[in-house]
Amino acid sequence: MKIAMHEITTRDGTFPEHMEAYAKTGWKHFEINMWHAEAYFTEHGIDAAVKVVTDNGLQCVGCTGISMSAFGDAEARQGDIDGVQKVGERMQALGCSALVVGCDVPAERTRENYPAHLDTMAAHVRQMADAAAPFGVTIAAEVNWCALCKSYRTAADMVSRADRSNVGLIWDPAHFVSTPSRVDDLDLARGKIVHAHLNDIRADTHWEVMDINADRVIPGDGILPLKAWTEKVEECGYDGYHCVELFNAELWDEDLETICTKVMSGCKSVWPDAQF
């Protein structure tokens, strides 16, 4: 099991402060939150950002993200293309390939028009993938955040329609458990899971009123069968890093190094031999 830190988990602090905290607490791999890091890239440039990463002995293994406008106007769709090229240049410099994306949704969805909507989304994802390809970037569509894909079954269908080698899905336990997905649905995405997030869900959660973000806790502190699920994901062909992505207000109250230490300790309780 290979585990990385997602910058969202250490929400506060600057980009260099995140990198320093990861290095001090034994993390070697991380996923960049490009929205958070935007200020640093804009002010200091790509080379300076890469230097902060390498000086701390870290490796970037993924990037969040872009929220696509497949059902927006032509200007919005072109903005997505421009955005993926901008982010792609940064990702190429950082040496990471998986770009986590979400997508908007059309207002009217029926049994009859759903396939056409999936085709529309897939066509836009295809354009995004073509724009990302020169930078070595793979589009990793996130179930739920891509609001037309509320299950891994539908998301796998969309990926098939996009028909690009650099388009796939991201595995995320919180999104999996909160959608009408089934473990067997992952077989439909075999070979197309290109990135992964990692999280647990608090024990007192009732699925009917689950908050998909706020109810996340450190792996090992919740009730999800994470070991079995990640083994299934790996059996479906994914052997990359699982990036711990938490939106936990109580955790955010802690200092950066304490957050990093607590998250690593929790992960080790589930995967004692994990690589960080």
Image (spheres, rainbow, N blue to C red):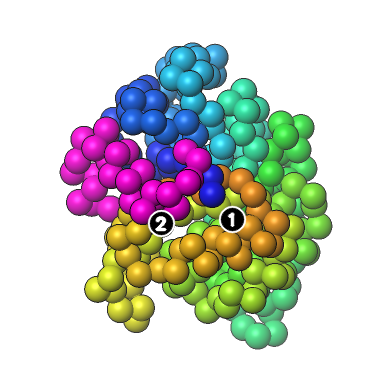
Query: What residue sits right under mark 1 in the picture?
Result: 170
Q: Position of residue 47 (x, y in %)?
A: 54, 14
Residue visible at 35% across and 69% down? 223
Regarding mark 2 in the picture, which secondary structure is present there? Answer: helix
Q: Which residues are magenta?
A: 248-276
Q: Are marks 2 and 1 in contact (CB under 8 Å)?
A: no
| Residue 35 shown in magenta | no
Residue drawn where x is 41% and y is 56% of the image: 270
Disc marking residue 270: 2
Q: CA distance from mark 2 to mark 1?
A: 21 Å
Image spot of residue 41 (x, y percent): 47, 22
From the viewer's perspective, is 136 left or right of 178? right
Judging depth in this view, the residue of 104 and 142 nearest the camera is 142
Q: x and y percent of residue 236 in the render?
A: 69, 62
State the residue in front, 152 or 79. Answer: 152
Considering every residue shown, the one lying at the far bottom of the view is 111
Residue 56 picture quarter: top left
Q: Secondary structure at mark 1?
A: strand
